[in-house]
Amino acid sequence: MAVAEVIALAGKGGTGKTTVAGLVVRSLRQARRVPILAVDADPNVCFDAALGLHPTRTISGVLHASQGLRGVPEGVPKATYLEYELEACLAEGRDVDLIEMGRPEGPACYCSANHLLRNYMDRLMGAYRTVVVDNEAGMEHLSRRTTRDVDLLLIVSDASQVGIRSAQRIRELVTELAVPVRRMALVVNRATRLPPEVETAIADNGLELAGLVPDDPRILEFELAGRPLLDLPDDAPAVAAVERMLAALGPEGGRA
């Protein structure tokens, strides 16, 4: 089975993380690093609007409805039943498919279901060349949902010292959770230049700066019109910036 390249994004709220994730998917598709599996691991699901794909169910919704797989029909193996239910969570597009993790299942323990989920996600990811995971600021989804390593983690921030400190905390959280990440890099969104104090903060924190993504009025136009970011024109400034960034990072993210 081929091993997919996994690119994950994280960042505090308000930095435009999901917008950057959508631009990353667009750039990967343009570079023909396809097929792509997009995973929305942020409980505040909005990756679907950026991609123009709308799953009818979420992973967490399936697990919650299954109640620990106690409602499996008689004679049907648990793994077969759950995989059938999970297939309904996948929204398919042109070279890009989307699956949504949804909100946490609550305090109940679904150890058996989560084990089957990890196995399913491993098999699913093996069918794609690239996987793009849009995370919440915390990295818990990466630590408990899948067993695959992350080749490249893009930490999205704004051009402020507060944002850089938040990015540093995310990097520390990755270490604390022992999430296997090969390479981490910082993306500063909605910026064409960095204030000197922010440049200093980045250097002091030892964060690798992948690039700046400018504030692009076309993104707002598309969002207001309900159009997916995948349809942005090639000459959009944010599109060009993300394409340059990914090209500089290399075709295989942080993979050796």
Image (cartoon, grey):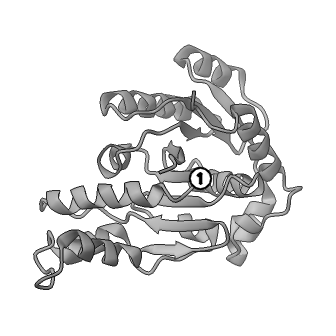
Closest to the observer: 13 or 129?
Answer: 129
Q: Residue 21 placed where, x, y %?
A: 60, 53
Residue in the picture at 12% in, 83% down: 75
Residue placed farthest to the front in the image?
Answer: 1
Residue in the picture at 31% in, 56% down: 119
Q: Classify mark 1: residues with Cα within 10 Å, few (<14), some (14-19) or many (20+).
A: some
The quarter of the rendered structure image containing the C terminus is: top right
Q: Residue 219 placed where, x, y %?
A: 74, 61
Give residue 60's quadrant in the image: bottom left
Give residue 23's quadrant in the image: bottom right
Residue in the picture at 47% in, 73% down: 90
Residue at disc 1, secondary structure: loop
Say if 211 sits above or below 129 in the image: above
Closest to the observer: 138 or 71?
Answer: 71
Say if 28 sits above or below 154 in the image: below
Q: In this rendering, would 127 be left or right of 240?
A: left
Closest to the observer: 177 or 217?
Answer: 177
Closest to the observer: 35 or 64?
Answer: 35
Q: In this rendering, would 207 be left or right of 106?
A: right
How many numbered marks appear? 1
Give residue 120's quadrant in the image: bottom left
Q: For the residue marked with disc 1, what is the amino acid?
A: Arg
Q: Residue 54 placed where, x, y %?
A: 53, 77
Residue in the picture at 78% in, 32% down: 193
Residue beneath label 1, please? 129
Q: In this rendering, would 208 be left or right of 136?
A: right
Residue placed farthest to the top in the image?
Answer: 204
Q: Residue 242 placed where, x, y %?
A: 74, 45
Say if 100 sits above or below 123 in the image: below
